[in-house]
Image: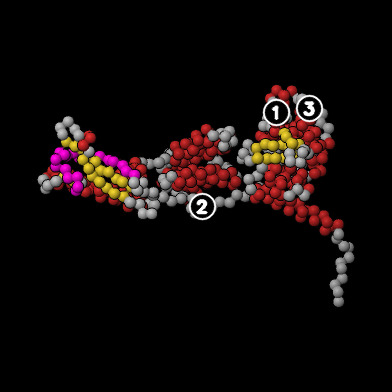
Amino acid sequence: MKTKVSILFYAKKAKAAANGLVPIYTRITINGKRIELSTNRFVEISKWSTEAGKIKGNSEEARSINNHLDLLKSQIRDAEMELIHKKIALTTETIKSKLLGLDERARMLTPIFQDHNNKIKELVGKEYAPGTLERYTTSLKHTIEFMQWKYNVSDIDITKIDHAFIADYEFWLRSVRNCANNTAIKYIKNFNKIIKICLANGWLDKNPFANYKSKVKEVERVYLTEDEIQSIIKKDFKTERLSLVRDIFLFSCFTGLAYIDVKNLTRSHISYGIDGEKWIFTHRQKTESASKIPILPVTQMIIDKYENHPQSNNQEKLLPILSNQKMNEYLKEIAGVCKIEKELTFHIARHTFATTITLTNGVPIESVSKMLGHKNLRTTQHYAKVLDRKVSEDMKILKNKFNLKAPIQKSM
């Protein structure tokens, strides 16, 4: 439907001055909604023609004021055409901003970025995890440091952001900040979200990311083999400290839960599932996605072992878990004692659940994805690719086993 814009000049009797002069106003109506703006001109009410919307006669005063009103009308029509040309919605608000020059003020990047972060901060624990706020806070810090490095400023008009700005920002992340490929791209992706906010609000005419291309390198996920898991299970640790870390790590290996999700578990997260057996019902803190995981015998043994542990009871937690830093520190010790030639970290347990515990043993990828709390199957498919390599390695062993000493003769 075509937007209908009408312009009316009128004498506003209700605001008559003490000297009897009445201010002239313009009323702009767009699709039934209207705004009124002062023309900063005054007239004796007897000289005003309501029908014509101007001063009667041909006096010098009439010519001067009527010319001013014609100029205003022309400016309104120009503003109307400019909004249409820029594909900005034609409303009373947008045309008023245009006429008053409110849309001409510079919109700066830093306050827009900070406003975005402030909104995330208010929603931490509701819609966002603390890690998300930390990630965007660091992104803003890096963005400001880049602008100081490149332009010697701590802020910039968003209309000045172009493809070169983004390319230089990525170069700075890789060179000055020494970020790895995937880390640099993650920061650029965070910055892109701010640009999308600017585009959605109509503050930018074109997308500076339009011709930008980046590629996340696939990281090979490290996981434990069945033999390595067994070596950890069977090892008799002499210290309670390593024994505890081993048990919590194995708990994650057989549930697929990340460190923070294990830490947040309470007894209330355990209930009976659709099969009448005990399940863990929780939500991943990182994505808020639901995870529903049947409890395996090994998992139950660990839960039972620490049921009356003082730390668990005092903190009302399911397990007495240490800090992530301490867990990873002690896991390196465990790897050394068990002669595991891998840099053992807590997150490897989650990868191990996805590969060795589930997919390798024939659990369908859809079920694994659901237990891991992945939002889409593509994330889980990365683990299936890992298994493809394992299949290749296993088949090499099989080839060597069936390698015939004498070649089969060709038929004549």
- The CA distance from mark 2 to mark 1 is 46 Å
At label 1, the amino acid type is Lys
Q: Horizontal placement of 70 versus 210: left or right? A: left
Task: Give yes or no for contact between labels 1 and 3 (Cβ–Cβ under 8 Å).
Answer: no
Task: Find numbered disc 2 in the image and state the secondary structure of the residue it sits on.
Answer: loop
Tell me if I can see residue 69 in this picture: yes
Q: Residues within 10 Å of mark 3 (few under 14, many from 20)?
A: few
Part of the protein shown in magenta: 33-52
Residue at x-position 80% and y-position 53%: 394
Which mark is first along the chain, 3 or 1? 3
- Give the residue pinned by disc 2: 212
- For label 1, the residue is 317
Horizontal and vertical percent position of residue 182: 60, 46
Identify which amino acid the numbered label 2 is placed on: Tyr
- Image height of 261 relative to 382, above or below: above
Estimate how packed mark 2 is, as few (under 14), some (14 to 19) or many (20 or more) residues with alpha carbons within 10 Å.
few
In the orientation shown, which residue stands out farthest toward the left?
59
Spatial CA span between label 2 and label 3: 53 Å
Of callouts 2 and 1, the N-terminal one: 2
Helix, strand or loop: magenta stretch:
strand
Query: Does residue 401 appear left or right of residue 70 in this picture?
Result: right
CA–CA distance in space, label 1 to label 3? 19 Å
Q: Tell me the element at label 1.
A: loop
Helix, strand or loop at label 3? It is helix
Q: Is residue 172 visible in the rendered structure shown here? A: no
Q: Which residue is mark 3?
A: 240
Rendering quarter of residue 230: top right
Q: Is residue 347 above or below residue 241?
A: below
Instruction: Tell me what residue is drawn at x 55 percent, y 36 percent.
Output: 133
